[in-house]
Image (cartoon, helix red, strand yellow):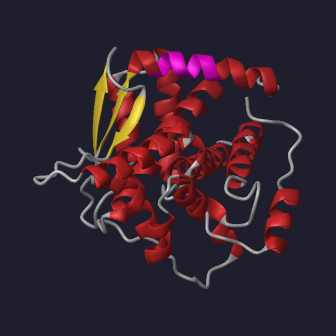
Amino acid sequence: MSNICLDGEKAVMLRSYMNDIRIRGMNSDNVSGIVNELSPRDIDGKLLIGCGINERFGATAQFDFSTRSISLSLKKLGKWLDTNLDDFIKVYNIKDFDTFRAYLFMFVIGHEIEHSYQYLMSTDIIEAPNNFLKNAYKGIFDILKSEDYIIPRPITQTRRIISVLLYKFKEDQYLLERNANIEGADFVSQLALYNNREDIFEIFDNVKKLMMKLGYINSNIGSIEETYRKTLMYRKYKKIYEDLEISDDERIRFGFNISDETRNKLLSKNRINKKLP
């Protein structure tokens, strides 16, 4: 499912980096090594995104589409991992704290890598599964860009500001974050399987299944339409909408509308006793 191509050789490489992080902690070398290992490349093997690492300052972890690079602060990311590790420990029977912390780190990096794939799809740098998804991503990235108008257009600017504020207010539930969480969790769960860690696989598979529900909790419209409706961009959604002939699994993965029957099966199939922290 994940856009990150994972095979046995890459899994071994990542395991080596994760062991280094457990022993020596995060540093510029092992973090940048992981980011470069997972980053999308062109047909000639050239990296399509950059990576900037700061010891103390900057974003905890963020894909900046304006510079096409992932930036992170080692200190802030370390604090984030410790806080969220404590939350997971309260819910799951985690005993190997250092190992799970390393997988949680991989989830953060995988999540940001998936954002880079979303942006590269939206700009035709890499091929999207279909035009509907490409345009759906593009519409969100477009409103998040700063616009420098030569001729003032206050109404257009105001609408954009409102859409940005509405998106930021619940961005964890909306299209870009939902799909990055799903793909990132899928990547980490598959990595856990390569390393014969069924316990960690089950946790991140649980995360993936919970994220897949977003967009279908209250209706069958899916995350794409829900995001555009709740950010006052429904007119734009109607312009990009396509009636695609794809499987239900693909519809759920990307957040397209599904039938009532499929929605009921999804919510029933993925009914999980444990909740995310």
Res 219 visible: yes
Task: Quadrant for residue 102, please give it.
Answer: top right
Q: Is 165 situated left or right of 195 in this image?
A: left
Camera-side residue: 232 or 24?
232
Q: Position of residue 216 (x, y in %)?
A: 73, 59
**Rendered view: 133 above or below 142:** below
**Rendered view: 160 above or below 245:** above
Please report the residue visible at 36 percent of the width from the left and 56 percent of the height from the top: 119
Camera-side residue: 158 or 181?
158
Q: Which residues are magenta?
A: 77-84
Q: Position of residue 208 (x, y in %)?
A: 68, 49
Please report the residue visible at 39 percent of the width from the left and 30 percent of the height from the top: 31
Is 227 contained in the magenta span?
no
Q: Is 78 situated left or right of 209 in this image?
A: left
Please report the residue visible at 57 percent of the width from the left and 82 percent of the height from the top: 244
Magenta stretch, main secondary structure class: helix
Q: Position of residue 7 (x, y in %)?
A: 53, 56
